[in-house]
Amino acid sequence: MKVSNPLGSQYDDLILPDHTFSIRMQAPETLSNASKAILDSFENPIASKSLKAIALEKLKRNPLAKAAIIISDNTRPVPYKGEEGILLPVLETLFSVGYMIENITILIATGTHRSMSKGEIAKMVDERVLKSGVRIVNHDCKDESNLVYLGDSSRGTRIMVNRIYVEADLKIATGLVESHFMAGASGGRKAVCPGLIGEGSTFVFHGVPLMADRASRDLNIKGNPVHEESLEIAKVVGVDFLVNVTLDHAFHTTGVFSGDLDKAHLAAVAKISETVKAPAPKAADIVITHGGFVGMNHYQCAKCAVASLGVLKKDGYLVIIADTTDEGNVVGGINYITTLALLKLQGAKGFLKTIGSPDWTFLPEQWQVQMWAKVFDRIDQDHMLLYSPSLGDIWWPGLPGINGKRFLSEADQSNPGPDCFTKMIEGAIQYIEEQTNKSIEDLSIVYVSDGPYVIPYTEESLEK
């Protein structure tokens, strides 16, 4: 069977065994006029005054009022440019009521991710925004001089938040709401926490207990401690107006949810809950999935791996394709690499025991490795086969799993063509046949066409 390659038109369609069960979320209806819907959401927001009214109130109190607009980094396909862009309309609203260009700052909520380059920003942000002259600043979680201490959360987090945002009179947060494997859903409060917090403020928020909590999972908000911690911190610093969107698999807008930080976000979560879950008849011997837009490095590929668990058999095989294009590092940061090597050496149970020890020193980014441990608690490390053209060249012994590059011919390894992903999948399946001593016809296969954006499940997995 032939399916469209989810990683871009530069690659050929994928060829999968005929008996593969393809799973995808329901296709939500896209907005016929996204630009109108954005402006309408500003005028008629959820549980809030209009953006214009709030902005004017701030100016009346201070004619030189400063505004901070939070945007996501390029690991999220938020529409910040074009006809569906949400950033330019926010700026134009502020200009229309009298905000001066020099008093507006766009803050990139990098969290603990690396800073974006000027080139990356230019690709992500509308050209008209760039030409406006409004300052665009990367948040730096390690820059103590640009963090403000706002007390401790109820769970003990030292709340350190970006100074530019804290000192702004008008605080606006933007983002995308999609399923998230820790916080239940992205968007909303996550623009602030972890988007604008200090590295030290992640120690509780992404610590072992919160990550291990059964409620810290995809599409679950109720009782989710990661969500609750994030929301509490965001409310401490404040968000005057939220602009969140939901998207379909082609990244077109399906909804705009503006207004109150909590209520507008919950409305967006309700929207995606209608379509993001997808049933499968049974768990599969082989699950084939992909890193999607977010899978720009190995770190982000954990999301599609964890999402696959709802349809992956115990001791099954997981085949991942990705296009890791991160300009900084196609694996991840040094802390991620270090703890990933520990997972490789100790295995899932040993790793979790180590990082759960009172003697363990918390390392930022260990939380993503803790998510990988969920995968390798289900399957052996050599049952995960991962291929990306760029990652294949720098695979090193500390990476768990098998480098899918080995399933290509020598010529394709050195010069992967547009059919490289299909060839990798074919080679991976042959390898699995050899390992299991079964023919492909005797192995059940699920293809997760939406990768990290869908929650596939079986009736049995729902009961767990």
Image (cartoon, rainbow, N blue to C red):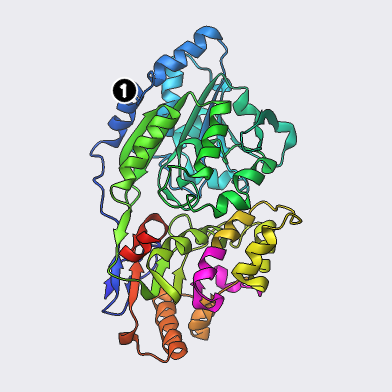
Question: Is 458 left or right of 435, judged from the image as shown?
Answer: left
Question: Is 71 left or right of 444, judged from the image as shown?
Answer: right
Confirm whether the magenta stretch covers residue 396. yes
Identify the element where label 1 is drawn.
loop
- Residue 110 in the image, given as x and y percentages of width and height: 58, 43
Label 1 Cα neighbours within 10 Å, binned few <14 / some 14-19 / many ≥20: some
Residue 52 placement: quadrant: top left
Q: What is the count of numbered marks?
A: 1
Pick the residue in front: 103 or 255. 255
* Amino acid carrying mark 1 in the image: Asn
Confirm whether the magenta stretch covers residue 457. no
Pick the residue in front: 285 or 391. 285
**Magenta segment:** 373-398
- Residue 343 in the image, given as x and y percentages of width and height: 64, 68
Determine if residue 196 is in view.
Answer: yes
Residue pushed farthest right? 359
Pick the residue in front: 6 or 416. 6
Residue 446 placement: quadrant: bottom left
- Residue 94 in the image, given as x and y percentages of width and height: 45, 20
Quadrant for the C terminus in the image: bottom left
Q: Note whether 208 is above or below 437 in the view shown.
A: above
Q: Note whether 182 is above or below 311 in the view shown.
A: above
Please report the residue visible at 46 percent of the width from the left and 36 percent of the height from the top: 188
Residue 290 placement: quadrant: bottom left
Q: Give the residue pinned by disc 1.
A: 44
Question: Is 360 left or right of 209, judged from the image as shown?
Answer: right
Quadrant for the N terminus in the image: bottom left
